[in-house]
Image (spheres, rainbow, N blue to C red):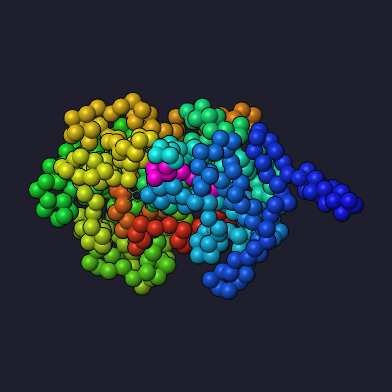
C-alpha cells in the first residue's frame, strides 16, 4: 500500500511538471538523453523532446508534431534553429538531427534545434488529401506558435527563431519569414487548433527557394529561351516564346531596385544578373576556386576596367567583394550570359516549357506544383492564367487565393514598419534577417526568382545576405561555416 502511495505521489509530481495550455501540452521532464557523432568524431550530447503535437485538432498523426533537441548548456535565451525538411512540396517528417547538415552543426554550436513535421501534397487520410496548399505552411506556423506558447517552460528563445529550408523548404522558409502574424492565415490556423500566439520569426535561411510560382514559368522562359534545348524543340519553342514575352510587364510591375538603389527594369535585368553571377564567380575565385575559361567569363589583371562595378550596396554578402583579393591577380570582369546559360543547361537538362504549370500544356503531365494547388480529392490544378487558358479554362477563385497565400512576394513591403517584431500588437511582421543562397548552376527555377525575393526584402528594410553560390546545383545546407558565421553576426 505504501509503495502504491509513493508511486502515485511520484507520478503526480511528474504530471504536475507537465504544462497544458490552450489544449496543448509540453512536459519538460519528458526529455530523453541522446548523442550525435559529428563527421569529425566529436560527440554532441543533447536532450530530445519528441512527438510534441502542435495543434489541438490533429488531422495527421504522422506529421503534425515537432521535435525539440536541447544541447548541454542551453537555456531559455538560447536561439533556435528551426529546420524544415520539406522537399518537392511533399509531407515532411519531424526527423532527428543529422550530423551532416545544419541541425547537427547547430547542436554542436549550442543552438536549440526544432524539427517540425508538416503535411504536403501527398498527405492523405481516408482518401482525402489533407496537405494541399497552404496546409504545409499552416503547419509550420502552428509549430512556431506552439514554441511561443511554451517559451517560458522550454529551453530556447522563441523570439530568436531562425528557420532554415531548401528548395520547396526554402520557399516555405521564405513564406514563414514574410507572413509572420498575417491575418490572412488566422482563421485557418484557428480552425486547426493552433495556439493563439504570434508566428513571426527572427530570421529566415532560404536555400534555392522554389517560390513565386505564378511567375516562375515566365522567368524561366525569359532566361532559357535562347538555349539550344529550347530552340530545338518545335513543340515547346512557341510556349517558351509566349511566356518570355510576359517578362517585361512582370518585372517592370515589381518596381525593384538593385543593391545600390537603381531601378530594375526589363531592359537592365540581364545586366543585373550578369553582375550577380560575376560576383558569385569572383567570390569563389577569391577563395581559391579555379574558374574555367569555357563558361563565358572574361578575366583581367586590372580591376573592372570600365566594366559594371561588382558592388552590392546594403547586401551583407558583399563586404568580401568590396576588397577583392583575387588569386593570381585576376579579376572577373565580364560574362557572356548566353554562353553561361548554355553551360548551366549542359550540367542538367532544363525543365520543359512551361517549367512549373505543366498540366495539360502540349500534352504534359501534372507537376508537383499542379498537385500542390490541387483539390482534396487528389486532383491537380493549373495555377497560372497562362496554362489554364491553354486548357480553355479560368482559374477558380480558391486556386487564385491559395496561389496568393503561397507567394512570399505578396507580403513584403506592403505596409510601413512591418519588418521585425512589434511587441505591442501581434501585427504582420516580416523577419528582420535573411540569408538567401541559390546555386550558380541550379536550373530548378530561374535565377531572377531568388534574386527578386532578396531585392524586395532589401527594399523593405530587411537585412539581406544574398549570393548565387558558385558551382552549386540544386541543394542546401552547404558552406556551413559561412552560414553559422552569419547566424552569429545577427544574434
Ligand atoms: C523542388 C524542386 C523543384 O524543381 C520543384 O519544382 C519543386 C520542388 C524541391 O526540390 O523541393
Is 163 a magenta residue? no
Quick check: can you spot residue 276? Answer: yes
The residues colored magenta run 116-124
Which SS type dominates the magenta stretch? loop
Asked which quadrant contains residue 317, the reply is: bottom left
Query: How many numbered dots are placed on residues in this image?
Result: 0
Q: At which x and y percent is residue 126? A: 43, 39
Q: At which x and y percent is residue 301? A: 31, 67
The single residue placed furthest to the front in the displayed view is 1
Q: At which x and y percent is residue 276? A: 34, 52
The single residue placed furthest to the right in the displayed view is 2
Q: Nearer the viewer, residue 284 or 80?
A: 80
- Residue at 42 percent across and 44 percent down: it is 123
Q: At which x and y percent is residue 292? A: 27, 69
Quick check: can you spot residue 144? Answer: no
Q: Nearer the viewer, residue 100 or 334?
A: 100
Q: Is residue 44 left or right of residue 365?
A: right
Asked which quadrant contains residue 295, the reply is: bottom left
Task: Answer above or below: position of 141 versus 168.
Answer: above
- Residue at 20 percent across and 55 percent down: it is 338
Is 118 a magenta residue? yes
- Residue at 33 percent across and 41 percent down: it is 371
Amino acid at each position: 500500500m505504501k509503495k502504491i502511495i509513493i508511486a502515485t505521489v511520484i507520478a503526480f509530481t511528474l504530471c504536475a511538471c507537465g504544462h497544458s495550455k490552450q489544449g496543448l501540452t509540453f512536459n519538460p521532464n519528458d526529455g530523453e538523453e541522446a548523442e550525435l557523432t559529428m563527421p569529425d568524431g566529436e560527440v554532441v550530447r543533447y536532450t530530445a523532446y519528441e512527438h510534441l503535437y502542435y495543434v489541438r485538432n490533429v488531422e495527421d498523426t504522422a506529421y503534425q508534431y515537432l521535435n525539440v533537441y536541447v544541447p548541454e548548456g542551453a537555456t531559455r535565451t538560447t536561439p533556435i534553429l528551426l529546420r524544415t525538411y520539406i522537399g518537392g512540396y511533399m509531407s515532411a517528417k519531424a526527423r532527428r538531427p543529422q550530423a551532416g547538415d545544419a541541425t547537427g552543426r547547430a547542436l554542436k554550436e549550442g543552438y536549440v534545434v526544432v524539427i517540425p513535421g508538416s503535411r504536403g501534397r501527398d498527405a492523405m487520410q481516408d482518401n482525402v488529401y489533407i496537405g494541399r496548399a497552404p496546409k504545409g505552411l499552416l503547419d509550420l506556423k502552428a509549430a512556431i506558435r506552439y514554441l511561443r506558447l511554451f517559451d517560458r517552460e522550454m529551453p530556447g528563445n522563441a523570439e530568436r527563431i531562425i528557420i532554415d529550408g531548401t528548395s520547396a523548404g526554402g520557399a516555405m522558409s521564405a513564406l514563414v519569414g514574410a507572413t509572420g502574424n498575417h491575418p490572412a492565415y488566422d482563421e485557418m490556423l484557428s480552425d486547426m487548433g493552433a495556439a493563439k500566439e504570434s508566428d513571426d520569426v527572427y530570421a529566415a535561411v532560404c536555400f534555392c527557394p522554389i517560390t513565386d510560382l505564378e511567375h516562375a514559368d515566365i522567368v524561366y522562359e525569359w532566361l532559357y529561351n535562347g538555349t539550344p534545348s529550347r530552340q530545338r524543340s518545335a513543340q515547346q519553342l512557341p510556349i517558351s516564346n509566349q511566356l518570355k514575352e510576359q517578362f517585361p510587364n512582370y518585372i517592370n510591375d515589381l518596381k525593384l531596385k538593385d543593391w545600390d538603389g537603381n531601378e530594375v527594369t526589363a531592359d537592365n535585368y540581364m545586366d543585373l544578373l550578369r553582375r550577380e553571377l560575376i560576383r558569385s564567380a569572383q567570390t569563389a575565385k577569391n577563395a581559391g576556386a579555379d574558374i574555367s575559361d569555357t563558361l563565358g567569363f572574361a578575366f583581367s589583371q586590372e580591376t573592372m576596367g570600365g566594366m559594371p562595378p561588382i558592388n552590392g550596396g546594403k547586401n551583407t554578402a558583399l563586404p568580401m567583394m568590396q576588397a577583392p583579393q583575387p588569386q593570381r591577380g585576376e579579376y572577373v570582369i565580364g560574362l557572356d550570359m548566353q554562353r553561361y546559360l548554355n553551360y548551366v543547361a549542359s550540367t542538367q537538362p532544363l525543365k520543359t516549357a512551361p517549367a512549373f504549370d505543366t498540366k495539360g500544356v502540349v500534352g504534359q503531365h501534372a507537376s508537383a506544383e499542379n498537385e500542390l494547388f490541387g483539390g482534396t480529392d487528389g486532383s491537380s490544378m493549373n495555377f497560372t492564367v497562362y496554362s489554364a487558358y491553354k486548357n480553355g479554362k479560368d482559374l477558380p477563385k480558391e486556386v487564385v487565393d491559395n496561389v496568393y497565400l503561397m507567394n512570399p512576394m505578396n507580403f513584403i513591403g506592403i505596409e510601413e514598419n512591418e519588418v521585425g517584431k512589434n511587441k505591442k500588437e501581434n501585427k504582420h511582421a516580416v523577419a528582420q534577417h535573411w540569408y538567401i543562397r541559390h546555386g550558380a548552376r541550379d536550373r530548378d527555377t530561374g535565377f531572377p526568382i531568388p534574386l527578386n525575393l532578396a531585392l524586395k526584402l532589401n527594399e523593405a528594410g530587411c537585412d539581406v545576405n544574398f549570393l548565387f553560390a558558385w558551382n552549386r546545383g540544386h541543394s542546401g545546407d552547404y558552406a556551413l561555416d559561412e552560414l553559422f558565421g552569419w547566424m552569429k553576426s545577427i544574434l
